[in-house]
């Protein structure tokens, strides 16, 4: 894919956030998921017919292509993700979706703002290996397929396809990159082999601890704090 194509049809990477089926959501959250999922089905599903995964799809940091999403564009993406398909390797020609995104949130951790959607995948025989590879950490990273209209140069604020600046180069000490503005559509999210945004696996339990206790949560996890925590669900790869 050439530079012009990348500017017109972007690929930006995050990683699957592990939400293993062994600890699928229960209670009110699980019921909420089921209600939202059934908005996209032709018949009502039951909770044992699908598995839910949560993943970071894109964020506001400069990536390996020296591009980034402004936060207001992440707001647009966040609203457009529900209802879009989960694909493999952006293959829109030879394969059909593996799942459907049904919910999205904007997740902030420090300076990083991420689009963090949920996707459901049916527990069909044809999806058995796909689900197992996600749960086993083999299929880890994700990418967003989208279109946008204006690649804004960080140095001169002009269209980077028409200015003299080169992404990745420095000008008077300032790194040149481009901001992806004017997001028009989200086409799909894909599982890919290699991503570029550097996020890591977390479990839903781990995320809850960090959100609830902040910096104290890190010490709780590192010291093996176990009161009310099932440590088998609080692992991550760091």
Image (cartoon, rainbow, N blue to C red):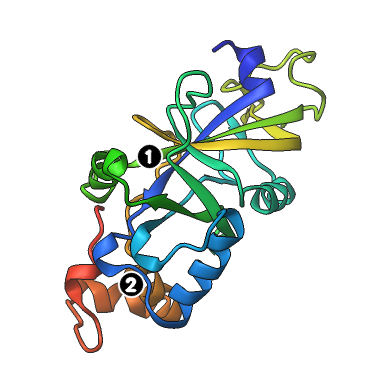
Name the foreground residue: 191 vs 176: 191
> Distance between the Cα atoms at labels 2 and 1?
20 Å
Residue at 56%, 56% (x, y): give it.
102
Q: Is residue 238 above or below residue 194?
A: below
Question: Pointer 1: what residue?
Answer: 141
How far across and down, in percent of the image, does residue 154 sit?
72, 32
Name the foreground residue: 175 vs 157: 157
Q: Earlier in the sequence, mark 2 or mark 1?
A: 1
How far across and down, in percent of the image, does residue 73 sit?
72, 45
How far across and down, in percent of the image, does residue 93 sit?
52, 18
Q: In the figure, is residue 106 to the left or right of 53?
A: right
Element under label 1? strand
Q: Is residue 49 above or below residue 158?
A: below
Question: Pointer 2: what residue?
Answer: 205
Q: Is residue 202 visible?
A: yes
Residue at 33%, 69% (x, y): give it.
206
Q: Are there few (<14), some (14-19), or many (20+) residues within 10 Å of tag 2?
A: some
Residue at 21%, 71% (x, y): give it.
222
Element under label 2? helix
> Which quarter shows the N terminus?
top right
Image marks 2 and 1: residues in contact by CB distance under 8 Å: no
Q: In the figure, is residue 200 to the left or right of 120?
A: left
Can you tell which quarter of the image residue 65 is in? top right
Q: Are there few (<14), some (14-19), or many (20+) residues within 10 Å of tag 1?
A: many
């Amino acid at each position: 894919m050439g530079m012009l194509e990348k500017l017109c049809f972007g690929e930006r990477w995050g990683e699957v956030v592990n939400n293993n089926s062994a600890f699928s959501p229960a209670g009110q959250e699980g019921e909420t998921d089921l209600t939202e999922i059934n908005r996209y089905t032709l018949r009502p599903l039951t909770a044992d017919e699908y598995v839910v995964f949560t993943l970071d799809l894109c964020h506001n940091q400069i990536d390996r292509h020296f591009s980034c999403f402004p936060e207001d564009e992440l707001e647009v993406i966040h609203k457009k993700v529900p209802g879009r398909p989960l694909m493999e390797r952006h293959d829109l020609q030879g394969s059909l979706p593996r799942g459907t995104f049904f919910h999205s949130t904007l997740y902030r951790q420090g300076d990083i703002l991420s689009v963090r959607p949920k996707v459901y995948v049916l527990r069909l025989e044809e999806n058995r290996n796909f689900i197992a590879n996600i749960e086993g950490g083999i299929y880890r990273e994700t990418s967003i397929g989208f279109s946008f209209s204006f690649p804004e140069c960080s140095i001169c604020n002009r269209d980077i396809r028409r200015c003299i600046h080169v992404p990745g180069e420095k000008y008077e000490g300032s790194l040149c990159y481009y901001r992806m503005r004017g997001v028009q559509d989200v086409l799909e999210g894909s599982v890919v082999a290699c991503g570029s945004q550097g996020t890591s696996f977390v479990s839903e339990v781990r995320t809850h601890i960090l959100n609830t206790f902040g910096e104290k949560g890190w010490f709780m996890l590192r010291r093996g704090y176990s009161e009310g925590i099932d440590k088998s669900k609080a692992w991550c790869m760091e």
